[in-house]
Every structure is written in structure tokens, then in C-alpha cells.
Amino acid sequence: MAGANSGTRRQKPNILITGTPGTGKSTTASALAEATSFKHICVGDLVKDKNLHDGWDDQFESHVINEDLVVDELEDVMEGGGNIVDYHGCDFFPERWFDLVVVLQTENSILYDRLTRRGYSGTKLSNNIECEIFQVMLEEASDSYEEEIVTAMQSDTIEDIDDNVASLTEWIQSWRP
């Protein structure tokens, strides 16, 4: 797992954990934040709590995120380092913010079960499963960030999550500004 610190003056790295909904982003980010004392920023919660959206999308049953407002809200926080950002999109965040971009991936039948347990159905369910099948999040991350800072991690089981957290914790401990 490589990591580039492209001239930043941060004393701690920032990590983006992304992936299709249901891949374990929040679970992984929370566990990693606990293991490292880094700040976990769940962008979905931030959008709701601070009204950083342009309304509600009935078809997808979610807020329409205002990316500019999110970036403005996080700019100062990200400058300090020590953040784990958790969101299912990644192409609107400034490249300079992240030292590592983790794309969590989950086997399709496991993801289907997770999403249906969350109440996903219809278009919302099928679109998210298709995103995982076609590795849309990995492609988005690869298109948005330097190749050497993007890594994919399997997230099918609790053991996978534990292994990912251990590996990421080790990466953080070895990171140098």
C-alpha cells in the first residue's frame, strides 16, 4: 500500500475510504479512527447535519449533495491532517487532501444482502449493485487521484474489516510527512 505525501506540511495523513454503499466504509472508518485517534468524518452525516445539500431525490431516497458546500466546510479541517473521510463518492474532493484513497469492495451477493437489509429496493438497489459489478468506485478513484495512493481492499467479512483496519493502522504508523 503506497502513499504519496506530495509536499504537504501536515504532520498526520488524511485517508479517504470510499466504495459502493454497503461495502463497510463507516464500519471500517469508525474502527480505524478508534485505533488511531484520527477524526472520522462521515460525509453523509455532515451533509444532513449542516444542510450541505440541494434538497431530496425521491427516486434515490437521499439528499442531493452540494459538493461545493462540502468542500468549503471541510477545507480547514483537512489542512490539519489526521482525518478519515468516509463517502461513497470521491471525484469532487481536492486531490491535495488525501495521502491514501481506499476503495472497499464487496462480493455482489453479500452486498445485495446488506443493501436489502437496509431497505434498499428498486432503482436504488440495482444501481448500487451495478456500481459494484462494474467497479465504478475504483475507476472513479483511479481517475481522480494518483495511482500510487489508490488501493482496493476486500470487505466481505468482519475478518476482512479487522485485517483492513490493522493494515491501515500500520500504514498510518509508518507515514512520514
Image (cartoon, grey):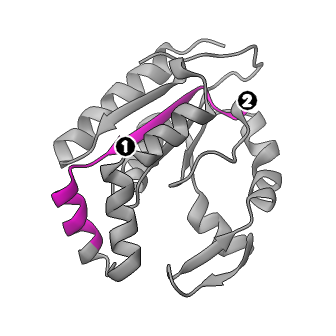
* Crowdedness near tag 2: few (<14), some (14–19) or many (≥20) residues, C-alpha within 10 Å: some
- Identify the residue under disc 2: 96
Residue 123 picture quarter: bottom left
Asked whether 103 falls inside the magenta stretch, the response is yes
Q: Which residues are magenta?
A: 96-115
Instruction: Pinpoint residue 50: horizontal percent, then vertical percent.
Output: 73, 71
In the displayed structure, 142 sits above or below 56; it is above
- Identify the residue under disc 1: 104
Q: Is residue 16 visible?
A: no
Residue 167 picture quarter: top left
Instruction: Pinpoint residue 86: horizontal percent, then vertical percent.
Output: 52, 51
The residue drawn where x is 44% and y is 20% is 171
Report, in whole angstroms, how far the alpha carbon at label 1 lies from the one at label 2.
Answer: 21 Å
Instruction: Pinpoint residue 85: horizontal percent, then vertical percent.
Output: 57, 46
Could you tell whether 27 is left or right of 156 in the image? Answer: right
- Quadrant where the N terminus sits is top left
In the displayed structure, 133 sits above or below 142; it is below
Label 1 amino acid?
Leu
**Helix, strand or loop at disc 2?**
helix
In the displayed structure, 127 sits above or below 55; it is above
